[in-house]
Amino acid sequence: MSLWEYANPTKFMETSGRLLPWVAALAAATLASGLLWGFFLTPDDYRQGASVKILYVHVPTAMMAINAWLMMLVASLVWLVRRHHVSALAAKAAAPVGATMTLCALVTGALWGQPVWGSWWEWDPRLTSFLVLFLFYLGYMALWSAVENPDTAADMTSILCLVGSVFAVLSRYAANFWSQGMHQGASLSVAPGQRMDDAFRTPLYIVLAGFVLLFVALVLLRTRTEIRLRRLAALAARERMA
Amino acid sequence: MMPDLGRYAFAVLAAWGVTLALTGGLVALSLWQAARARRALAEREADRTPR
């Protein structure tokens, strides 16, 4: 069996239809347990007090904002190289999920920054690259809506995705590249003296897994919707020509 | 039992509220769009089936 079998929409619909309820249920269970643990059962941080609880919504959404774009990049490359329609539709389906995660990360970051840094916003390399990434998400979705021919739209959005990947990478590594600004480096560092205490780290890993599963479930669901809409458009076009 | 968030109550509750509302809204919108597309395609394919 080859991975490319799933480029066939019928095969994708069959397999995703079987997988989706399980992934969705697992996502709901993992998210519920991780978020409840993070909110109710974690102690205050010695320096940041109770504001550390924002960690459980800020870090996973920021991670998914970047990873969603990287998934779109892989799907776009598959479209550009092999012209598989399901991959182009999967990239399109992931964009609203990534945009929502980016917006969540920006808002929760501002709400965390105000009490801890004394500022809602700083033109810091990491924050700025995240804002640009959000604008890329909006542009990507607008481009899909603006171009009528679906193959042309897939080509143009794939190129936009390649360009935006620079900012997805910058969003992750900006704090390391420039060593300046207010934002810290990696939250889950294993470097000596920077390792997060297990009391915070274990529920964070569970929430991270929950957000990954939620992303997979949403992309499967939305890709199935896009395939159905494409089929509807094809049927309408066939009837017009008949 | 609700944890004591002290002077960070607004920041913590607002951050969690925004995230849960946006994520919940996205899930609800995705489910609604999926149901609408499934229904529309089923109706269109039923119309094409010869009776």
Image (tube, coloured by chain):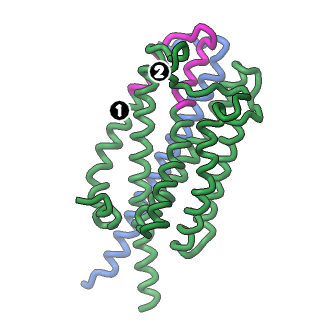
Chain colours: A green, B blue
Q: Is residue A46 on the magenta stretch?
A: yes
Element on which disc 2 rests: helix
Disc 1 residue type (three-letter): Ala
Q: Specify whether B37 is left or right of A192.
A: left
* Mark 1 belongs to chain: A
* Residue B33 seen from this side: no
Q: Which residue is mark 1?
A: A29
Q: CA distance from mark 2 to mark 1?
A: 14 Å
Chief secondary structure of the magenta portion: helix
* Mark 2 belongs to chain: A
Name the one closer to the observer, B20 or A169. Answer: A169
Q: Residues within 10 Å of mark 1 (few under 14, many from 20)?
A: few
Whole-percent x, y for residue A50 in the image:
59, 14
Nearest to N terminus: mark 2 or mark 1: 1
Same chain, marks 2 and 1? yes
| Magenta segment | A33-59
Q: Is residue A190 above or below residue A128?
A: above
Whole-percent x, y for residue A16 in the image:
31, 55
Q: Residue at x 24, y 84 (%)?
A: B51
Element on which disc 1 rests: helix
* Residue A27 seen from this side: yes
Whole-percent x, y for residue A114 in the image:
72, 24
Q: Residue at x 69, y 29 (%)?
A: A179
Q: Specify whether B36 is left or right of A102.
A: left
Of all residues shown, which one is farthest toward the bottom?
A: A242
Disc 2 residue type (three-letter): Gly
Of all residues shown, which one is farthest toward the left?
A: A1
Q: Residues within 10 Å of mark 2 (few under 14, many from 20)?
A: many
Q: Which residue is mark 2?
A: A38
Whole-percent x, y for residue B28 in the image:
47, 47
Q: Is residue A118 on the magenta stretch?
A: no
Disc marking residue A186: none
